[in-house]
């Protein structure tokens, strides 16, 4: 994680052993984990770590633009360490989330945009993943 550590060190983030463990868990993680998922994964190595430490670290990372908070799952808040613009496929059965890196050209008619300057977008596609489709 030395290469990844430099990215966080340059952000001014204080790198405690617990934060390093959380960052290591997030590094390259494509599962869009919840705070509870991260806590369960990291507490094996740090059994005295609290869930509050995970939430506080995630909030700090979010404020510094190092993680994105996803609100698409009504059952739990998820976090995405991939901060470059992308979209998501969401399985309505198992709640699996998959990154989509295709760029879509979207423009709103001026009348609907009400003069709003659009600086980005995020599209969510809902459906059933192949595993869930094969179960039915």
Image (tube, rainbow, N blue to C red):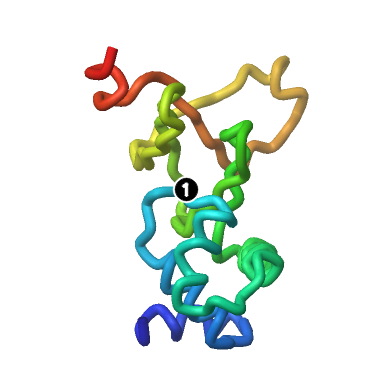
Q: Quadrant of residue 97?
A: top left
Q: Residue at x 56, y 47 (%)?
A: 78
Q: Residue at x 43, y 23 (%)?
A: 93
The answer to whether residue 64 shows anywhere in this view is no
Q: Quadrant of residue 19?
A: bottom right
Residue annotated with mark 1: 85
Q: Position of residue 62 (x, y in %)?
A: 64, 61
Q: Residue at x 58, y 34 (%)?
A: 72
Q: Nearer the viewer, residue 121 or 96?
A: 96
The answer to whether residue 76 shows anywhere in this view is yes
Q: Nearer the viewer, residue 102 or 3?
A: 3
Q: Position of residue 35 (x, y in %)?
A: 59, 56
Side of 2 relative to 57 (left or right): left
Side of 5 relative to 119 (left or right): left
Q: Position of residue 26 (x, y in %)?
A: 44, 64
Outermost residue on the top side: it is 136
Q: Looking at the figure, which quarter contains the C terminus?
A: top left
In the rendered image of this protein, does residue 64 appear above or below residue 91? below
Q: Position of residue 6 (x, y in %)?
A: 45, 85
Q: How many marks?
A: 1
**Which SS class for mark 1?**
loop
């Amino acid at each position: 994680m030395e290469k990844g550590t430099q990215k966080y060190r340059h952000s001014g983030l204080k790198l405690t052993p617990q934060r390093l463990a959380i960052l290591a868990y997030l590094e390259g993680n494509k599962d869009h984990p919840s705070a509870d998922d991260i806590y369960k994964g990291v507490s094996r190595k740090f059994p005295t770590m609290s869930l509050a430490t995970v939430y506080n670290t995630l909030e700090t990372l979010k404020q510094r633009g190092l993680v994105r908070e996803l609100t698409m799952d009504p059952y739990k808040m998820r976090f995405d360490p991939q901060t470059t613009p992308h979209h998501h496929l969401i399985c309505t059965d198992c709640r699996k989330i998959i990154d989509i890196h295709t760029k879509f050209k979207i423009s709103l008619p001026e009348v609907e945009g009400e003069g709003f300057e659009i600086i980005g977008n995020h599209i969510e596609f809902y459906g059933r993943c192949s595993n869930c489709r094969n179960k039915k």
